[in-house]
């Protein structure tokens, strides 16, 4: 792993509860890690969203927050950052990614319209469906093949995309490229693929938008995995990526390293003027959109820090270090490494647990009991039930995701996690599945309760 390009100025205390206490806490939480209090968790890998550590420059910028309702200078600074880094002239601030998705899809998606793209994130999918549209997954097949080592598993399957566009000439709302793809392991999209998709979009006269929650991590992968761009500086790669989009939606809680915030960035004035009134209705006036002035200041700085080479080298290096450490023990881990998280194949590791007893959740519980580590299941529990048959849907993979917050944990923390998994690996045969004691019908993984089988 590369040397950390920062040192610690302020600390947050964490403590590992004794083993018996952890057992009590997880039992009381109904074996659902979302119900654990954060002080009962030692290493929190639940998400990388909004959990990053801000820099001294971000904290300093916070003090300059202009909280004026209209004409805020903080908004101007945020807009300048977006223009400088991403190259889009028009910016609509939103409280977070799904706020941007709500405003955007309420205008662009009409009943029965299609949004082809690569591994739409679940809130994106939900907003398209909420507006009675249909997301069409056109990700390449390798994305769902655990054995594949394709360097850009997030790529769009060009043939499939063309078929969808040809068959439905009047039904396409827009094409969406998500970079990187959270849904399939933080996997990136190549610049070559972005360029090809853009050519297709132009040919079929449909707009192309990006979900750029993790655009900086994607740019880093382009630099390190796509030979042609090896010598390009990261800001140039970012501008080149964005050149092909008509606009982008961002959850700034990821690559802009802030605790809250997001925006819609657009190339065209017409769409900006159409979306504006909706943004005012749903998020807030155009100069704050649900964010405090101080949050826009932190975002303006974080967006610049998020594309620094040393930072990204270390960040992606942490994911690789953790992934390699786990793989060395024998644990099946998704490869190539993604940008923000390590994904363990719990289905492979715990073959004795059937999918309807949720191996990913069983492994998440074991990680908490053994070491106070909190991750999240991405498998059949998250998939939910088939609305027609009411049967549990079988996910393509039973994963446990460890999302690593930005600039938060040290190599010692990662070594600790690897140590704990050395112990879990030896005891894996004794890990048991779970069954519902209370099943919530919507987004059930967040708030259902379980008992051990
Ligand atoms: C790719 C992607 N898009 C959109 C979102 C939604 O963003 P938010 O959580 O800020 O609403 C997320 C959140 O994890 C994401 O990973």
Image: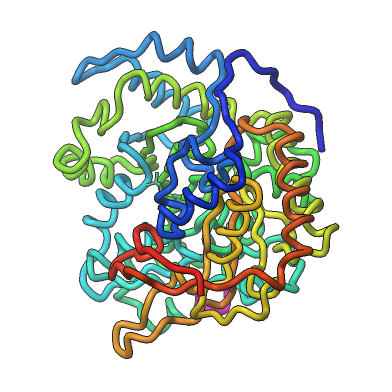
* Horizontal and vertical percent position of residue 18: 60, 41
- The quadrant in which the N terminus is found is top right
* Horizontal and vertical percent position of residue 279: 21, 41
In this picture, residue 372 sits left or right of residue 441: right
Residue at (68% x, 71% y) in the render: 430
Residue at (35% x, 35% y) in the render: 90
Residue at (61% x, 51% y) in the render: 402
| Residue closest to the eye, 381 or 153 | 381
| Residue closest to the eye, 56 or 370 | 370
* Horizontal and vertical percent position of residue 290: 26, 33
Q: Is the residue 252 above or below the residue 47 in the image? A: above
In this picture, residue 267 sits left or right of residue 192: left
* Horizontal and vertical percent position of residue 332: 74, 66
Q: Is the residue 28 above or below the residue 16 in the image? A: below
Magenta highlight range: 158-162
Q: How is the image coloured?
A: rainbow
Residue at (74% x, 36% y) in the render: 313
Instruction: Work out whether residue 239 can be spotted.
Output: no
| Residue closest to the eye, 313 or 421 | 421
Q: Quadrant of residue 342?
A: bottom right
In this picture, residue 314 sits left or right of residue 245: right
Q: Residue furthest front?
A: 20
Q: Quadrant of residue 12?
A: top right
Q: Is the residue 39 above or below the residue 435 in the image? A: above
Overall secondary structure of the magenta section: helix
């Amino acid at each position: 792993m590369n040397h950390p390009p920062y040192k610690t100025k302020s600390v947050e205390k964490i403590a590992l509860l004794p083993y018996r206490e952890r057992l009590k806490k997880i039992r009381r939480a109904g074996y659902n890690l979302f119900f654990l209090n954060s002080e009962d968790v030692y290493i929190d890998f639940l998400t990388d969203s909004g959990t990053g550590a801000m820099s001294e420059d971000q904290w300093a910028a916070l003090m300059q927050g202009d909280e004026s309702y209209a004409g805020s200078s903080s908004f101007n600074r945020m807009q300048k950052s977006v223009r400088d880094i991403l190259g889009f002239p028009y910016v609509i601030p939103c409280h977070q990614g799904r706020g941007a998705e709500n405003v955007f899809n309420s205008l662009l998606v009409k009943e029965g319209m299609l949004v082809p793209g690569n591994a739409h994130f679940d809130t994106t999918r939900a907003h398209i469906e909420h507006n009675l549209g249909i997301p069409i997954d056109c990700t390449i097949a390798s994305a769902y093949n655990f054995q594949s080592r394709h360097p850009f598993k997030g790529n769009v399957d060009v043939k499939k995309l063309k078929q969808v566009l040809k068959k439905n000439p009047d039904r396409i709302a827009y094409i969406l490229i998500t970079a990187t793809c959270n849904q399939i392991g933080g996997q990136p999209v190549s610049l070559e693929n972005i360029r090809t998709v853009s050519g297709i979009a132009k040919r079929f006269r449909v707009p192309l938008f990006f979900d750029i929650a993790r655009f900086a991590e994607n740019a880093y992968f382009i630099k390190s995995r796509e030979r042609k761009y090896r010598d390009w500086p990261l800001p140039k790669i970012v501008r080149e990526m964005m050149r092909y989009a008509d606009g982008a939606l961002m959850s700034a809680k990821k690559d802009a390293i802030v605790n809250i915030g997001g925006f819609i960035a657009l190339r065209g004035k017409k769409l900006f003027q159409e979306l504006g009134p909706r943004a005012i209705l749903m998020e807030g006036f155009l100069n704050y959109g649900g964010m405090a002035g101080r949050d826009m200041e932190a975002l303006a700085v974080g967006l610049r820090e998020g594309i620094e080479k040393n930072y990204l080298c270390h960040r992606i290096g942490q994911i690789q270090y953790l992934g390699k450490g786990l793989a060395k023990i024998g644990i099946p881990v998704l490869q190539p490494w993604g940008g923000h998280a390590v994904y363990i194949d719990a289905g492979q590791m715990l073959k004795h647990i059937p999918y309807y007893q949720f191996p990913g959740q069983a492994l998440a519980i074991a990680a908490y009991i053994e070491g106070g580590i909190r991750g999240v299941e991405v498998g059949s529990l998250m998939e939910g039930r088939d609305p027609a048959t009411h049967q549990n849907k079988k996910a393509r993979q039973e994963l446990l995701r460890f999302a690593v917050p930005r600039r938060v944990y040290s190599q010692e923390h990662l070594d600790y996690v690897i140590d704990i998994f050395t112990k879990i690996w030896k005891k894996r045969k004794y890990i048991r599945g779970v069954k519902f004691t209370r099943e919530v019908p919507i987004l059930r993984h967040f708030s259902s309760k379980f008992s051990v089988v």
